[in-house]
Image (cartoon, rainbow, N blue to C red):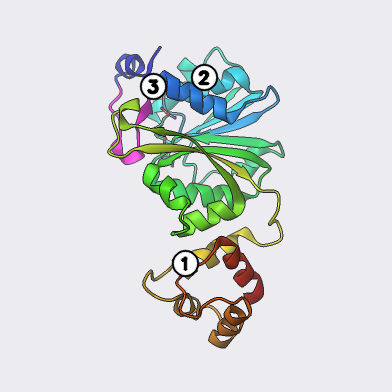
Amino acid sequence: MNTLSLIKKHNIKPKKSLGQNFLMDEKIIDKIIDSVDIKKEDVIIEIGAGLATLTKHLCKKAKKVIAIELDKDFIEILNLELKEYKNIEIIQGDILKINLRGLADGEKIKIVGNLPYYITSEIIYKILKEDMDLVSLTIMVQKEVCDKIFKTKVPLSVILQFYFLIHIVDTISPNSFFPNPKVTSSVLNLEPKSLNDDIDKNDFINFVTNSFKMRRKTLINNLKIYFDESKIIRILNNLNINLKIRAEELDVIDFYNLFIALL
Ligand code: SAH
C-alpha cells in the first residue's frame, strides 16, 4: 500500500513537531534502499520508522531490522504493517535517549533514517560517541546542510568530513514527501573512515564546537577560554596558521593537528 493510502487507512494527522514528512515517491525510496547496499547478514537500525515505508524494504533484504519510533501512535501501525516479517524489532522511544551500542549488541551496524532536521547534528554526534561497529549511516538532511558540509563552515561539516567518507545519494524535492516540507532535502551515505580512532570523539566534537562558539571571534579568542593563550599561539605558529584565523577558515585536518597539540 502506498504512503497516501496508509495515511488515509490509519487516519493519520502528521505531527509537525516530530518532523513527520513521509516519503511517498517510490523511485526515491528504491534509490535510498539501493544506496544502503544491504547484504543478507546485515543488521540495520532505522531511526524514525513512521509508516514502515523504508522499513519494509529493509526487512526484505537484511538479517535483522531494529526500527525506532518516538510516536506512540505509530507503534501499532508498524506492528500491523510489518506483521509478515520475523526479522523486525520495533522500539518505541527517542533516538537521543536510546542506548544504540546496547541495541547493536556487538554486531556490525548500518543505520538508516529520515528524521526531523532539527536533530540532525545531535543524532550524528550521538552515533559517533556511542562508538559502535558502524558500517554506514544513510541519512536525510536539509539540502542546505549538505551544501555546507563541503564548505567546512560549521561544526557539523568539520565533524562529518573528519570521521566519514561522504557520498551524496540524491537531492529530493519537497514533492516527494507528504506533507511537503518547506525545504529541499539530500540523502547522504556516510561511511566511517578507518583512521582517527586515537582521539576521544566526545572531546574532539566539543573542541570543534567550541572553536566555532562565537562566529565573529577569531579561533584564538574562542579557544582561550579553554586553553592557555600563549600555548595556542605557539601551536598555531608551529602549524603555520595565521593568528587571526577564524574557525570557518581552518582546514579539517588543522582541527585535528591543533587538538592533538593542545592536549
Ligand atoms: N521513515 C519514514 C518516516 C519519516 S518522518 C519515512 O521516510 O516516510 C520522521 C519520523 O521520525 C516520524 O515517524 C517521527 O515520529 C519520527 N521521530 C521524530 N523524532 C524522533 C526521535 N527523537 N526518535 C525517534 N523517532 C523520531
Q: Residue furthest bottom?
A: 230
Residue plotted at (38% across, 15% down): 2
Assess whether mark 3 and mark 1 are in contact (beta carbons under 8 angstroms): no
- Residue at 42% over, 19% down: 26
Left or right side of 80 for 128: right
* Neighbours of disc 2 within 10 Å: few (<14), some (14-19), many (20+): some
Examine the rendered structure and indicate whether residue 76 appears above or below residue 122: above
Residue 167 included in the magenta stretch of the image:
no
Q: Which mark is residue 249?
A: 1
Instruction: Tell me the quadrant of the picture where the N terminus can be found.
Output: top left
Q: Which residue in the protein does label 3 denote?
A: 25
Question: Looking at the image, in which quadrant does ligand 1 appear?
Answer: top left
Q: On the picture, is 207 further left or further right than 186?
A: right
Q: Amino acid at mark 1?
A: Glu
144, above or below 247, in the image: above
| Residue type pointed to by label 3 | Asp
Q: Where residue 203 sits in the image (x, y, percent)? A: 59, 65
Q: Which mark is residue 56?
A: 2
Q: Position of residue 120 (x, y in %)?
A: 44, 46
Query: Mark 2 or mark 1: which comes first in sequence?
Result: 2
Residue 203 visible (yes or no): no
Residue visible at 36% across and 16% down?
Answer: 6
Mark 1 nearby-residue class (10 Å; few <14, some 14–19, many ≥20): few
Q: Nearer the viewer, residue 151 or 47?
A: 151
Magenta highlight range: 12-24
